[in-house]
Image (cartoon, grey):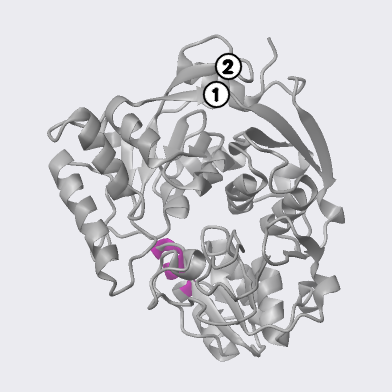
Amino acid sequence: MKQTLTEKILARAAGKESVTPGENIWARINVLLTHDVCGPGTIGIFKREFGENAKVFDREGVVIIPDHYIHTRDEKAHRNIATLFDFAREQDLPYFYPPWTNRYRGVCHVALPELGHVRPGETIVGTDSHTCTHGALGAFSTGIGNTDAGFVMGTGKMLVKVPETIRIVLTGKKPDYIAGKDVILRVIGDLGTGGATYCALEFTGPGCASLSIEDRMTICNMAVEAGAKNGIFAADDKALAYVRARTKKPFEPLVGDPDAPVKAEYTYDLGALVPCVARPHCPDRYAPAADCADVKLDRAYVGSCTGGKIEDFEMAARVLNGRKVAIDTFLVPATVEVAEAIRTREIGGKTWERIFAEAGCIPVSAPGCAACLGGPVDTFGRTHGNEVVISTTNRNFIGRMGSKTAPIYLASPLTVAASAIEGRIADPRKYL
């Protein structure tokens, strides 16, 4: 029986030879991820259902990475983190990465693979819709609610309906003016925000070879913006090298059958794509950046799990080197590893940090989610009025970055940096 990659991983997780779309299975979970927003609720459900003294299904299978509301004076945010501290101590969890310590890492979706917790062929669930990021490394990875997570925390299993697969075939080679963000915004623009509801988006084809791991992370992260259950790439040599450099744990990659039946198939030539944006207030409102040159901006934002990685800041530094920004430009590294790269990596003998400072950007913030999810009123970069924003984040819903009256345009770091220079939406090709 021919099966897609998602079907093969779920069949293995269920201890079955094969599965079919629509089938309900009990899947064994390898990793449960949670953070400071949903972790306390998950813990509360776990204790209610399994008992105050219950133990988690696997100490090494629960990963807690606080990241959303960290750099704030908000008392409720601090209370959530205190709950995580207490639980990690009670359970003796080895993979708790708390703030205000030298174990703090930053945004969970970037830190999880950095730390070697993402392995091809495994099943990963997390209390965050963008957990689908980790399909970039050949894992089945999806977001779940607190109730499901509380059950997984106690049993290591989850009831899953096998999704249908939509195959996205990528051909050609990615130009240097295109980022993973441009790829996925084009796909979402074509599918719509409901076009892949409860489907697996499987990215395949010869064009995948020209995508970096971080490109793939951005693409899989935003699969959910088309309604997808998960996004996934098969683990090629590039992905295997990334994983093996970060973990000694054994894993067994799987590869889908190229002729497995799918719900639908779409083909994109990477070389034909253009820098683009998603207009307010929805990620599927695709438009070429060149068609939006009349949009004046108040601020630019480079950060988040889709725009705060090492390559994202390298792209921004390439565009901003030797130039000045015309609007407030906020820079938020996703993790401490990214922050270190900003401080130490160079272009033309200048660190990226110096390039950003000379360009007039607001000083780089501490790693974390910051304004991507709005956050408390003292959150770095949070909108408070009618600011028109161009951002590398993954959602531009009303109120997403704080103010309900702030229009948000989504774009790649290249387009955001070019737009920061001009004070209006700009095609970055003129700066490369």
Secondary structure of the residue carrying numbered label 1: strand
* Residue under the image location 82 percent in, 62 percent down: 274
- Picture quadrant of residue 312: bottom right
Assess whether residue 8 is covered by the magenta stretch. no
In the rendered structure, find residue 161 and report the number of the disc placed on it. Answer: 1
Q: Are marks 1 and 2 in contact (CB under 8 Å)?
A: yes
- Picture quadrant of residue 66: bottom left
At label 2, the amino acid type is: Glu
How many numbered marks does the figure carry?
2
- Side of 181 where 365 appears, left or right: left
Q: Residues within 10 Å of mark 1 (few under 14, many from 20)?
A: some
At label 1, the amino acid type is: Lys
Q: Which residue is mark 2?
A: 23
Tell me the quarter of the image containing the C terminus: bottom right
- Picture quadrant of residue 78: bottom left
Residue 255 visible in rendering: no
Q: Which residues are magenta?
A: 336-342
